[in-house]
Every structure is written in structure tokens, then in C-alpha cells.
């Protein structure tokens, strides 16, 4: 059972008051060009490829424990660190990159992980201090225990179709099969999955919608039993990990799990069933 000392989403005011705390690490999840053009002072850069196994056949496959822990140490994160992830807000993919990084940090065993509400955009628009160039982190040694229950395999999904609520967090067009994502082999969705688009998590300004607005989305599809297992997937995992972060870290569900292979793996198997042009 995790014990947080910071909220899963923090405001720019909160971070402004605490960004120089010795145990706080600010991780900027944007690409290196945007980061070097301007970032929160002291923030270290860890773009989306930081959180994946670059040699895996599937996109955005989770790194090994050894590689992930080495990455965290190289960013100056140790097991007692509090980490705030800062992202971009230009589109849903940028917003999901920050949530993907935060959820991967939770997977690595960190309790105190948060996302800056409104990202770097809100911080800069408020006239708060920024700097350009790059920050060289002071290396640390990270040790932790992976939360392997956060993820399920293709076989687990296939064997439990219809038994566990399954949420497809892609756009309605991708879910319905009206369009096919480039990295999938076939259009459509896993039978029995409900559509819960990741884009619904955020406002047009790139801030998180309040829990009282997000909660009915989830309860309408899963129910209000916080102990009930729910499985999420998307095209390659950032959207599903964004909703997992909301469902478990913000709304208090205890057993939200991600099919990390996602539609990209499922659609490679010609025998794996898909539904198209329907909402079930």
C-alpha cells in the first residue's frame, strides 16, 4: 500500500514554493529541443524514449528493472525522492507523455510521484522563472521494487475477455475502426472493450479535469467498487497509462492494470479477435 506525501497532481503554486527542496526532483518529459529552449530551473530532461526499451520489437515496451533503475539514478532520483513530472500541453500525445513518465515512476516503486497541472505551458504563461540550456543531474543510486501487478499480458487479456472490465483509451475513431493507427496491423477494438478516450482527461488548456468530473466517466463503465479489477489498453500504452494514473492515483481504485502490448501487439496476431463498426 503506497503512502503519498504529495498529491498525484500539483499546481504551479505548489511547485513554485517547493522546487528547491533538497529531496524534490523535477523531471521535464518534453523533447530535448523544447526543454533546452526553456524549462523550470533545475529540471532534468527525460523525454518519452527514456521510459522504453529501445531494442524491443513493440513500441514503448517497458525497460528492464535494471535499465529503469539505472535511468532513475542517472536523473538524480533515489528511493526517497519526491518527483514532479512536467510535460507539454500542445496536444493529447504531449499530455500523455507526462502521464506515461509518471506512471512508469510509480511502476518503479516510487510513492511520491506527481504531475504538474498545466505543464510547462502554464508555468511559463504565469511568468514564473525559467532557464534555457541543459541541466546535468547529480547521479544517485536508485533501488526499488517493480509493481508488476500494474501490467497484464496478451494471454491474460485473451483468457479473460468478458470477465474483467476492459477500457480502450484511444480516440473513438480508432476504437470504432473508422481509422487505423499506423503501428497496428488491423483496425478495430478488442471484443467487449468500452471506449474511454484519453483526451477526456484534460481541459482545452491542458490541465486535468477535476476528480468529480472524471469519476463519473469511470464509474459509468466500471462501477464504484474501488477494489474491482479493470484493464486498460490503447495503441502503444501512453493513453492507457494516463487513465491508469487517473483511475488509481487520483480516484483511488486499487487494481487498475494496463495491457502494455496494446493494440499494436494484439492486431499482429491474425487469430486475435477484433470488433469493428460497433460499440461493444
Image: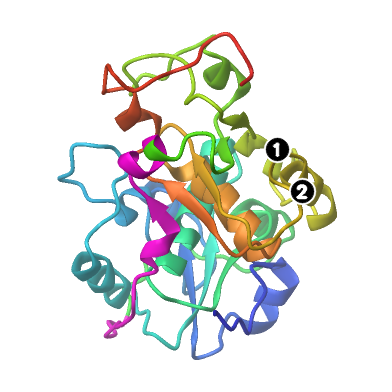
Query: Could one spot residue 132 in this view of the protein?
Result: no
Instruction: Estimate the x, y position of residue 84 in percent, counting from the top left.
Output: 54, 70
Q: Is residue 22 above or below residue 188?
A: below
Left or right side of 274 for 266: left
Q: Is residue 108 above or below residue 162?
A: below
Find numbered disc 2 in the image and state the secondary structure of the residue it sits on.
helix
Local crowd at mark 1 within 10 Å, few (<14), some, or many (≥20)? some
What residue is rendered at 18% in x and 37% in y? 57
Instruction: Estimate the x, y position of residue 2 in percent, counting from the top left.
Output: 55, 79
Q: Among all residues in the image, which is located at the extreme left? A: 55
Q: Nearer the viewer, residue 149 or 97?
A: 149
The reply to whether discs 2 and 1 touch (Cβ–Cβ < 8 Å) is yes
Say the numbered circle drawn on residue 214.
2
Please state, as top left, top right, bottom left or bottom right, where the N terminus lies in the image.
bottom right
Please state, as top left, top right, bottom left or bottom right, where the C terminus lies in the image.
top right
Q: Which residues are magenta?
A: 138-158
What residue is rendered at 50% in x and 57% in y? 38
Say the numbered circle drawn on residue 15.
none
Of the image marks 2 and 1, the number of the one nearer the N terminus: 1
What residue is rendered at 27% in x and 16% in y? 270
- How far apart are the alpha carbons under marks 2 and 1? 8 Å
Q: Is residue 276 above or below residue 236?
A: above
Left or right side of 240 for 67: left
Instruction: Estimate the x, y position of residue 82 in percent, counting from the top left.
Output: 51, 81
Q: Is residue 277 above or below residue 129?
A: above
Local crowd at mark 2 within 10 Å, few (<14), some, or many (≥20)? some
Instruction: Estimate the x, y position of residue 176 in percent, counting from the top left.
Output: 57, 15
The quarter holding residue 261 reads top left
Q: Does 220 lie within the magenta span?
A: no
The quarter holding residue 119 reads bottom right
Amino acid at each position: 500500500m503506497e503512502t503519498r506525501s504529495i498529491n498525484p497532481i500539483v499546481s504551479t503554486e505548489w511547485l513554485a514554493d517547493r522546487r528547491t527542496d533538497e529531496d524534490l526532483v523535477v523531471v521535464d518529459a518534453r523533447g530535448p529541443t523544447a526543454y533546452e529552449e526553456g524549462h523550470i530551473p533545475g529540471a532534468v530532461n527525460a523525454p518519452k524514449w527514456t521510459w522504453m526499451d529501445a531494442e524491443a520489437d513493440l513500441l514503448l515496451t517497458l525497460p528492464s528493472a535494471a535499465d529503469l533503475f539505472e535511468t532513475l539514478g542517472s536523473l538524480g532520483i533515489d528511493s526517497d525522492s519526491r518527483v514532479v513530472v512536467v510535460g507539454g500541453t500542445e496536444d493529447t500525445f504531449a499530455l500523455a507523455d507526462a502521464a506515461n513518465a509518471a506512471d512508469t515512476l510509480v511502476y518503479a516503486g516510487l510513492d511520491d510521484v506527481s504531475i504538474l497541472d498545466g505543464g510547462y505551458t502554464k508555468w511559463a504563461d504565469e511568468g514564473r522563472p525559467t532557464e534555457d540550456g541543459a541541466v546535468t543531474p547529480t547521479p544517485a543510486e536508485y533501488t526499488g521494487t517493480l509493481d508488476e501487478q500494474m501490467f497484464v499480458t496478451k494471454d491474460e487479456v485473451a483468457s479473460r475477455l468478458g470477465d474483467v472490465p476492459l477500457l480502450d483509451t484511444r480516440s473513438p475513431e480508432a476504437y470504432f475502426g473508422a481509422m487505423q493507427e499506423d503501428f497496428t496491423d488491423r483496425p478495430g477494438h478488442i471484443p467487449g472493450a468500452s471506449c474511454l478516450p484519453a483526451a477526456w482527461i484534460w481541459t482545452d488548456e491542458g490541465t486535468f479535469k477535476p476528480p468529480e468530473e472524471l469519476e463519473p466517466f469511470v464509474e459509468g463503465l466500471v462501477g464504484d467498487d474501488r477494489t474491482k479489477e479493470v484493464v486498460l489498453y490503447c495503441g502503444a500504452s501512453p493513453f492507457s497509462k494516463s487513465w491508469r494514473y487517473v483511475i488509481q492515483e487520483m480516484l483511488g481504485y486499487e487494481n487498475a492494470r494496463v495491457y502494455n502490448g496494446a493494440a499494436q501487439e494484439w492486431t499482429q496476431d491474425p487469430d486475435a479477435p477484433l470488433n469493428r463498426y460497433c460499440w461493444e
